[in-house]
Amino acid sequence: MGGAGRASGVTVNDEVIKVFNDMKVRKSSTQEEIKKRKKAVLFCLSDDKRQIIVEEAKQILVGDIGDTVEDPYTSFVKLLPLNDCRYALYDATYETKESKKEDLVFIFWAPESAPLKSKMIYASSKDAIKKKFTGIKHEWQVNGLDDIKDRSTLGEKLGGNVVVSLEGKPL
């Protein structure tokens, strides 16, 4: 892939950074504020392919869980488009044998069936968005439903074999 080293000239919309900062900061908040927290959110390229933006209506709020969303992980997987790429943030709640943890995971979704052009621009723009997501420990590139549909794969990403449950469900 010639020219992959140069950035694609894509900028990151301020709203994307705001969403990230809101998800990253786990300040003690009221129940109401907690319910509005994003559990998962998708980001896509704007129509003119010049900006990475927050994808409209592709999110799960903490308050949805137990209400309209039974299992946030499977609901998140269902948000991913089968034939196009996306970036996503997923706020994973999991347990190891020792403790309960929460970690943000940056996911680069690039399914086999996405158009080559889309894969190329998302791949070359990934650093632009990742640079804005400071302090993320986990990055996961997913190339299809088989890689992501089973929550234990994310468990392995988060902590190898020490993770015993994800979103309250045993692995």
Image: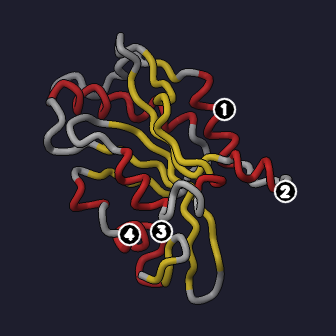
Comparing labels 1 and 3, the label whose residue is closer to the camera: 1
CA distance for labels 4 and 1: 27 Å
Residue 41: % across, % down:
51, 42
User: Is label 3 in a helix, a strand or a loop?
Assistant: helix
**Which label is found at residue 143?**
none
The residue pinned by badge 2 equals 28
- Indicate the quadrant containing the N terminus: top left, top right, bottom left or bottom right: top left
The residue pinned by badge 3 equals 158
Residue 118: % across, % down:
23, 27
Q: How many marks?
A: 4
What residue is shown at x 42% (from left), y 55% (from top)?
A: 75
**Which label is found at residue 18?**
1
What residue is shown at x 80% (from left), y 50% (from top)?
A: 32
Q: Residues within 10 Å of mark 2 (few under 14, many from 20)?
A: few
User: Quick one: label 4 or label 3, which is nearer the N terminus?
Assistant: 4
Residue 163 is at least partly visible in this image: no
